[in-house]
Amino acid sequence: MSLKGVIFDVDGTLVNTERDGHLVAFNLAFKDKCLDWEWDDKLYQYLLQITGGKERIKFYINEFHKNFQKDNLDEFIVELHKLKTDYFVQLVADGKAPLRTGVKRLIDEIDKSDLQMAIATTTTMANIEALIIHKLGEEYLDKFSIIAAGDVVANKKPAPDIYNYALEHMKLKPEECIAIEDSENGLKSSLDAKIPTLITINDYTKDQDFTGAKIVLDSLGDENSDIKVDVNFLENLLN
Ligand code: XBP
Ligand code: MG
């Protein structure tokens, strides 16, 4: 089967956004709302089992603040999450959270090839736009066949919905694509959509279970790395 498309996850894959962006933004939003909640690195790693910022806040309240009272909790969470998104976008605009090794190189190489490129992520569209504009350049927004994000599907990762949605728009079969992910939840999502998957781990995900992945790497690599993931490398993974 020949490779026709590459589908990227965003958080933890393109950028270490969880540590450098989302965690910081959640805490800033909590402070703004005068909540005495402060998530540290260890707690955040635990909370990452739940994908989606709104879903993560709800899970945190249910686990750690059972008696937290609000007339309309869901509305409160939506408002708090909007604030968190504003902080995230600002952090990215301020230059926080650099691209991971090899990401721009591979995106540029795919762009010059016949392959389609897409994004399948749990995160909010505003976050992706900020990341692409500030880390790659506004012109990169049009290089993706589809940016599938956040609430466009009913079920977030680890459900396969967001990958199926991306495949539908790309008009490609799962076996013609490779997904690039960083987490067990992401891998479950891509594998349930039947897409062969390459994993690049990060500090939050390095001990997770990646059974079923085509390959697990530290990063996409660069000229000085033992493995440099390029289009050829991805094509060979399918064969
Ligand atoms: C990413 C996430 C997201 C971010 C926050 O998972 O779980 O929830 O943490 O994004 P994946 P929002 O990389 O597997 O897509 O706050 O915008 O929801
Ligand atoms: Mg991820």
Image (cartoon, helix red, strand yellow):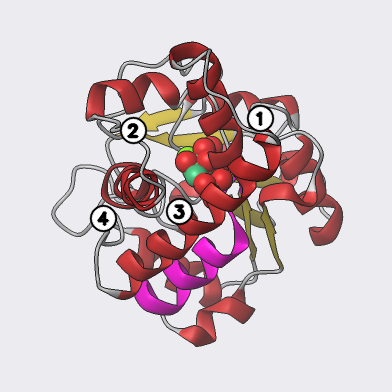
**Relative image position of residue 200 (x, y in whole percent):** 37, 38
SS label for mark 2: loop
User: In the image, 236: left or right of 89?
Assistant: right
Decide: is 137 above or below 107.
Answer: below
The residue carrying mark 2 is 201
Lateral position of residue 214 relative to residue 221, left or right: right
Residue 126: within the magenta?
yes
Q: CA distance from mark 3 to mark 2?
A: 25 Å
Disc 1 within 8 angstroms of ligand 1 (CB): yes
Q: Is residue 90 above or below residue 202?
A: below
What residue is shown at x 74% (from left), y 32% (from top)? 160
Q: CA distance from mark 2 to mark 1?
A: 16 Å
The residue that label 4 is drawn on is: 101
From this view, report whether residue 177 is shown above or below residue 73: below
Residue found at the very far bottom of the displayed protein: 139
Identify residue type, mark 2. Answer: Ile
- Residue 135 falls within the magenta-colored stretch: yes
- In the picture shown, does residue 72 fall above or below 101? above
Question: Which one is in front, 169 or 196?
Answer: 169
Q: Which residues are magenta?
A: 121-136
Q: Is the shortest distance between ligand 1 and the CB of mark 3 under 8 Å?
A: yes
Circle 1 SS class: helix
Report the Cα–Cα distance between label 2 and label 4: 12 Å
Pinpoint residue 14: horizontal percent, then vertical percent: 40, 54
The residue located at (67%, 47%) in the rendering is 177
Q: Identify residue type, mark 3.
A: Lys
Q: What residue would you read off at disc 3?
A: 84
Q: Which residue is mark 1?
A: 189
Give the amino acid at mark 1.
Ser
Locate the C terminus by quadrant: top right
Instruction: Answer with left or right where residue 221 lies relative to residue 26.
Output: left
First along the sequence among labels 2 and 1:
1
